[in-house]
Image: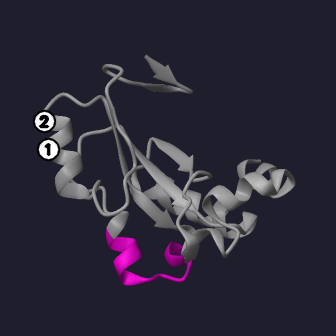
Amino acid sequence: MKIGQVMLPNRVFAAPMAGVTDKAFRILAREQGCGLVFTEMISAKGLVYRNQRTREMLDLSGEKGPVAVQLFGAEPEVMAEGALMAEAAGAAIIDINMGCPVPKVVKNGEGSALMRNPSLAAAIVA
């Protein structure tokens, strides 16, 4: 199976789950045969502002690829910079979160709130 230019060994994916898909989980999932693992949902703004905890969530060192990084945010420029940082960290795939329904995410226009603003969503993925 292939996503873009990324060849995957199988169709078994571990979905991005906040508070679950940390590095230890991803390594275990990979050892159990998972073909693609995702990071937890990572704040693009946290990456750009160099938040230490957020940057630790992006630590992909020592992991066998491919690893997908899921970013959330609502500012196209910040999302683009966060995506570049994720790519530099070794992300094979960048996933944009447009489904999180958590109120503290949605109130900032992020996550599932992006589905109410198609032009902003398009600008983020452009």
x then y, percent, for residue 30: 20, 37
| Left or right relative to 111: residue 38 | left
Instruction: Look at the picture and state if 29 lies above or below 46.
Output: above
Q: Position of residue 11 (x, y in %)?
A: 36, 21
Majority secondary structure in the magenta region: helix
Q: Secondary structure at mark 1?
A: helix
Please report the residue visible at 79 percent of the width from the left and 56 percent of the height from the top.
116
Magenta region, residue range: 46-56
Tell me which residue sits at (17%, 55%) in the image. Answer: 24
Q: Mark 2 — residue?
A: 31
Pinpoint residue 65: horizontal percent, then vertical percent.
Answer: 31, 38
Query: Going by the image, does 48 lie left or right of 10?
Result: right
Residue under circle 1? 28
Q: Is residue 55 magenta?
A: yes
Q: Nearer the viewer, residue 117 or 65?
A: 117
Residue 79 belongs to magenta span: no
The amino acid type found where label 2 is placed reads Glu
Tell me whether circle 1 and circle 2 mark residues in contact (CB < 8 Å).
yes
Residue 109 vs 2, above or below: the answer is below
Residue shown at 27%/57% (left/top)?
A: 20
**Quadrant of the frame with the N terminus:** top left
Residue 111, percent from left and from top: 61, 60
Residue 104 badge: none
Q: Residue furthest right?
A: 119
Q: Give the alpha-carbon distance from disc 1 to disc 2, as whole Å.
A: 5 Å
Q: Residues within 10 Å of mark 1 (few under 14, many from 20)?
A: few
